[in-house]
Image (spheres, rainbow, N blue to C red):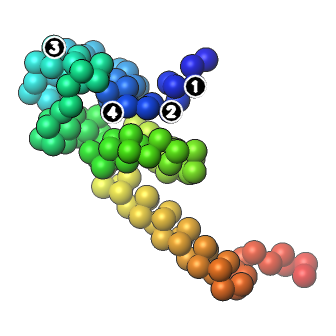
Amino acid sequence: MDDDASHPATLGELIRRQRELAALPMRQLAAMVGISNPYLSQIERNLRAPSDRVLNAIAEQLHLSADTLTTQVASPDAAKESAVLQAIREDPDLTNPQRRSLEEMYEAFREVTVAKRRRGIRDESDESPDA
């Protein structure tokens, strides 16, 4: 319904959305992170910016990396560029190390492919067996 829900524009919106996806009440996440419920509410409403320590704790409890949260906020178009990375970052069944590994492998594959295209080299797997 709301396009903003699928592409959060702010850190607070992204944290709220990830908390809701994890089915965590605000009070529970605040307790898990070690902050007050009003403070988390202010973060989610973009009234206060979390410290690095708080951001890392929130990300950890949501099974994300702080880099993932800030990358999505710093570059809202990044989600449009790569649905694969967005899916990896939002998959609740992956651990943070698994996410990082998949993201690194995906980016490495893309870099190799882009470099080959620039040099005009075709990948053997691109050619059909009928050719």
| Residue where numbered disc 1 is placed | 3
User: For the point 27% across and 15% down, which residue is it?
Assistant: 25
User: For the point 37% across and 21% down, which residue is it?
Assistant: 20
Tell me the CA gap for discs 1 and 3: 27 Å
> Which badge, 3 or 2, comes first in the chain's sequence?
2
- Which percent across, then down, holds residue 90? 44, 39
Q: Which labelled disc corresponds to residue 38?
A: 3
| Residue where numbered disc 4 is placed | 11
Describe the element under mark 2 as helix, strand or loop. loop
User: For the point 52% across and 25% down, which residue is it?
Assistant: 4
The reply to whether dot 1 and dot 3 touch (C-beta < 8 Å) is no
Q: Amino acid at mark 2?
A: His
Q: Is residue 42 above or below residue 88?
A: above
- 57 or 118: which is nearer to us? 118
Where, quadrant-wise, is the C terminus in this rendering? bottom right
> Which badge, 4 or 3, comes first in the chain's sequence?
4
